Image: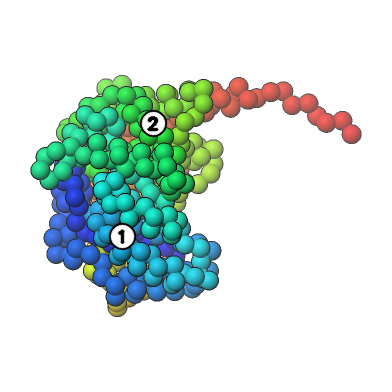
Amino acid sequence: MVPFRQFLLKIHSRCNLACDYCYVYESADQSWRDRPRLMDDRTVRRTAALIAEHARDHDLAEVHVILHGGEPLLVGAARLEALLRVLADALDGVAALRLTLQTNGLRLAEDPALLPVLARHGVRIGVSLDGTAATHDRHRRRPDGRGSHSGVARALRLLTDGPYRHLYAGVLCAIDLTADPVETYEALLEFAPPRLDLLLPHATWQTPPPGLAGRTTPPRTAPGTDPGEPVPYARWLCAVFDHWYGAPSRRTGIRLFEEIAVLLLGGAASSESVGLAPVDLVVVETDGTIEQADSLKVTYPGAPATGLDVFRHTFADAARHEGFLARQRGRAGLAHVCGACPRSAVCGGGLYAHRYRPGAEPHPFASPSVYCPDLAVLVDHIAGRLRQDVRALAVPVRPVSR
Ligand code: SF4
């Protein structure tokens, strides 16, 4: 059994934005409608105790708790303080508690009481920002239709310019093909993120990505470099990669590129997007139900559900659930096409949710990613750049005389 090391807690199930691509509110799974808005005290206490038990039972030196939503900061400063105190007390003397929070940023600028609470508990903060004001506001709008970029920018200034800089974990950006890639990258750099996450829009073979409506049939063999196959996401990402990698000094880290590079050099990745590492993240919803990754919400209603909850089950029960086991099988869990693909150790078949194709045999996730051709081109592109650099490194080695 692979123990969980990352616990994503949905502490508030609603949001103060109405982003058009949101996988929580706008996708196949609509389970948020039946959930309480807030994770109540009893659920927080029970979840914290179970995390500590799991850490103790599996001898984990540290656990990562990710505060998520909806918009997690809608809980308010007092509730946030209480919740963080419960987690800290439960893990005290058991395992190091690494806390992060993923937010749209708006509440940070609106409520001055929040940042001191987050600072007191050492919570690192990731903020969602999609690029220029125009690109960001095209998708990330308030319920009344107004854009949110100016509010997010105010929040980011609090993180970049003031005493809270050490809490700033980075920026998460959903890729919009209609935006210029380098312009997007430069717009994100204005907020000096320590790290960037560039996310492919969640999509499946049933609901293809924006700009690729015709991509509904997976390849039968591992992709070569078919010049006829459109790979707009690879082109977008390769443009950012070249700009980032070729810069005289690196101004931020980009997780996807760094992980592909590490995997190409024989190391291991820490995210589910690439590589073959077993999944070690579990979700607890506001009502205490235990679920799999949110990205599965784009596949079919109820896809992330396990039937388990923190009141009747443990995280060890969850770790034995078939849904988690299916994402821990490494190469054996890949589609036939991916198993025969020379890039599989790096690409890993792509994010599990992106493989979904109703009717696929022997199960609906037994296909390569809907981004397969793009992933192939991106991996080959990064490999090509690394190969050049490794060749340039190859100085003649003289034997040492003794
Ligand atoms: S999804 Fe990745 S591993 Fe699978 S065939 Fe495509 S490029 Fe290869």
Q: Position of residue 219 (x, y in %)?
A: 28, 36
Q: Give the side of residue 213 with respect to residue 83, left or right.
A: left
- Amino acid, disc 1: Ala
Q: Residue at x 32, y 55 (%)?
A: 113
Q: Nearer the viewer, mark 1 or mark 2?
A: 1
In the image, residue 352 above or below residue 75: above
Colouring of the image = rainbow
Task: Tell me the crowding category of disc 2: few under 14, some 14 to 19, or many 20 or more residues within 10 angstroms, Cα based.
Answer: some
Q: Residue at x 29, y 78 (%)?
A: 312
The quadrant of the rendering that contains the C terminus is top right
Q: Which residue is mark 2?
A: 189
Question: Does label 1 or label 2 sit earlier along the sequence?
Answer: 1
User: Quarter of the image holding residue 354?
Assistant: top left
Q: Which residue is mark 1?
A: 77
Q: Position of residue 201 (x, y in %)?
A: 25, 40
Q: Is mark 1 within 8 Å of ligand 1?
A: no
Q: Residue at x 23, y 69 (%)?
A: 287
Q: Residue at x 34, y 66 (%)?
A: 83
Q: Is residue 131 visible?
A: yes
Q: Give the side of residue 289 with respect to residue 328, left or right.
A: left
Q: Secondary structure at mark 1?
A: helix
Say how many tags the image has: 2
Q: Is mark 2 within 8 Å of ligand 1?
A: no
User: Quarter of the image holding residue 135?
Assistant: top left
Is 334 in front, or is 179?
179
Q: Secondary structure at mark 2?
A: helix
CA–CA distance between discs 1 and 2?
Answer: 29 Å
